[in-house]
Amino acid sequence: MRTELYINGEWRKAASGAHLEVVNPATEERLATVQAAGADDIDAAVRAARSCFESDSWQGTSGRRRGAILSKAADLLEARAQEFAEVETRQNGKPLFESKIDVAQTVDVFRYYAGWADKIGGEIRPVDMGDFVFAERVPVGVVGAIVPWNFPLNLASWKVAPALAAGCTIVLKPAPETPLTALLLGEILGDAGLAVGALNVVPGDGPTAGAALVRHPGVDKISFTGSTATGKLIMREAADTVKRVTLELGGKSPNIIFADADLKAAVRGAQTGIFYGKGEVCAAGSRLLVHRSVHDQVVEELASRAAKLAYGDPFEKSTRIGAIVSKRQHERVMGYIASGKADAKLVVGGSAGSVNGKGYFVEATVFDDTRPGMKIVDEEIFGPVLSVLTFDDVDEAIQLANQTSYGLAAGLWTADIKQAFRVARAIRAGTVWVNTYNLYDPAAPFGGFKQSGFGRDLGREALDGYTESKTVWIGLR
Ligand code: NAD
């Protein structure tokens, strides 16, 4: 297990000697003591990234070679998939089968951007005077990547892979709860032949390490995934140095079941939409909107499925709901459940759990008779808690779906193709899933509308965020 800071291709202790404890949320045992970056370490990491960027040792490497290194990293990760998945499960609490999916998706992300590395170019612009003008995409420079604890490895790859493909260099700050797989990612990219200093990994607290990264004048761009509150702070802080920012923030995504839907599939989709990843998923379908005519059937079926979802040891094959990531998050989720009990009708779940008296577990929880204005309907819980709302017609469904300050994702279930297109078009969200939910692919851009942020991870679009347009004008007259 790597526990030191990864700066300029070396493993180092924090300058201040500070460290942070990583706790296994399923057992409450200390998993690792990791060096915690302070402002001095962030400065060293940014200098390493800056000097790598300016020396041309990474951006001057041909796109094909950069792609080959990313591809090698994917192979190395694939070969160590089991180890990475186990570490992810230990630090995050998610079931092992979910961590294996995360690792497989991370391998895919590296392969996808390996393919892009030699295809980032530009185009000729036909200007009036007949001069030769082209606009090309050039790397934005040093990227500060700040990621949360819910998909620690996967979300890091969403930033690291496209940024490296584009020729940028990076300082990656993982969440203090889950720094271990990010450190291993640094090791793998080093082994794959990445230029020294092109990726630096600096675990640390948000207000110290994260804030130092955001303020550092040597950073050109911040790519952030996390809460909307922190995103707003980052946007303000970044203004002083006019840094580019991409923000992937929270959500309160509606998942709509129309009366004509394949109800079995829809209920399964509602279940995975909120309970996969313990609900600690930014795109979780945490508001289930159900047509009145099928409401009772849907809620009954969903409740019976939710009651069977076992929480417990994330390494047990039968476990479907792992441990909530931390004590603090567990308390937050239980606070929302208490407010739900006061405001709405508890259908199933609603209790905290433990295994052998330990662990931060929460039962799969469903509230019915909920409506806008309730905390459990308006606010992101980031836990396995679903709020069911009822609608009478398609216009009301659209209105309820959009009645949120967020706009990350949405789902809808219907057999009517016109209705599917109409509603998908009317919903203000970055991704709308139709007759499916929670699917991701490196080729499909992902990000938010409204207070869910701006800029996109994944797809060709992510590369736009790690490049700038440069116009070169050659006078021919
Ligand atoms: P958070 O905002 O508290 O922390 C996210 C990251 O930001 C962590 O690395 C943290 O250390 C850092 N940070 C905290 N304060 C900072 C500061 N002042 N300056 C710089 N960095 C700082 O969020 P969280 O509670 O760890 O994560 C959960 C949130 O992330 C949820 O709201 C969820 O919706 C969101 N999320 C969004 C997406 C997406 O793609 N849109 C994906 C996953 C999670």
Image (tube, helix red, strand yellow):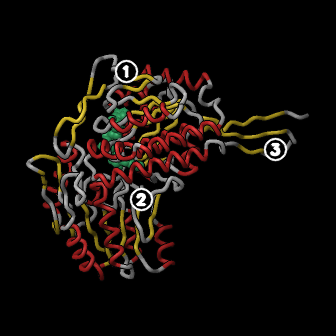
> Is residue 25 found left or right of 289 in the rendered image?
left
- Using the numbered discs, state the Cα–Cα distance from disc 1 to disc 3 in whole angstroms: 52 Å
Mark 3 CB in 8 Å range of ligand 1?
no
Relative to 90, 242 lies left or right: right
Quadrant where the C terminus is found in the figure? top right
- Picture coordinates of residue 271, whole percent (x, y): 29, 66
Residues at circles 1 and 3 in contact by the CB criterion of under 8 Å: no
Mark 2–mark 3 Cα distance, whole angstroms, equals: 40 Å
Seen in the picture, residue 239 relative to 412 is either above or below; the reply is above
Query: Residue at (44%, 43%) from the top-left corner?
Result: 77
Residue 450 percent across, percent down from the top left: 44, 52
Q: Which labelled disc corresponds to residue 12?
A: 1
Q: Residues within 10 Å of mark 1 (few under 14, many from 20)?
A: some
What residue do we see at 47% from left, 23% from top?
8
Residue 451, x across and y down, in percent: 40, 50
186 w.r.t. 115: above or below: above
Q: Which residue is mark 2?
A: 409
What residue is at 61 percent from the left and 46 percent from the top?
Answer: 116
Ligand 1 visible in quadrant? top left
- Would you name the residue on which mark 3 appears? 127
Residue type beneath disc 3: Val
Q: Choose the circle earlier in sequence order: 2 or 1.
A: 1
Identified by mark 2, the residue type is Ala
Q: Residue 310: percent from the left, percent from the top?
A: 19, 61
* Mark toward the viewer: 2 or 1: 1
The quadrant in which residue 365 appears is: bottom left
Asked whether 101 or 121 is in front, the reply is 101
Please tell me which residue is depicted at 29% across the width and 52% down the height of the picture. 96
Which is closer to the viewer, label 1 or label 3? Answer: 1
Q: Name which of mark 2 and mark 3 comes first in the sequence.
A: 3
Q: Nearer the viewer, residue 323 or 403?
A: 323
